[in-house]
Image: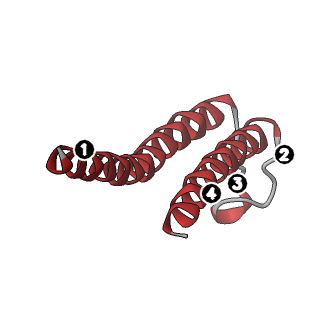
Amino acid sequence: MRDFFINSLEVLVGVIVVILGIGVLVAAAAATFGGGGGMGPGGMGGGGPLVGIAILIGGGLYIIIVGGFLYMGIGIYQNTRRTADAVEKLLTK
């Protein structure tokens, strides 16, 4: 039962990373190609290609950091489980 939840968490992390990636792409496209009317103080638009590139870079770094930490936590669990299995196997010899 425990393995089911860990494997489900791993799938969920993958889905979250994909959704974050799609969100960054949509936000960058909206900032680059959107009209920008009504955004910002005084109705000044804050869009343009440079803003879109900044969103891509910042969002990409965010996805790498968050996804990396989530996958690192899952990897630590997997390595700990394999080590415990190997120690148990050595003790039975």
Residue at which label 1 appears: 86
Residue at (68, 29) in percent of width and height: 49
Q: Is residue 50 left or right of residue 78?
A: right
From the viewer's side, name the closer residue of 27 and 86.
86
- Image location of residue 42, percent across then percent down: 68, 64
Residue at the image position 35 percent from the left and 54 percent from the top = 77
Nearest the eye: 13 or 22: 13
Relative vertical location of residue 9 with respect to residue 78 in this rendering, above or below: below
Q: Mark 2 highlights which residue?
A: 35
Instruction: Mark 1 or mark 4: name the one nearer the start of the chain.
Output: 4
Residue 12: give its label.
Answer: 4
Mark found first going from the N terminus, 2 or 4:
4
What whole-number distance in Å separates the C-alpha atoms at marks 2 and 1? 60 Å
Judged left or right of residue 58, residue 82 is left
Name the disc covering residue 44, or none. Answer: 3
Question: Closer to the observer: label 3 or label 1?
Answer: 1
Q: Secondary structure at mark 4?
A: helix
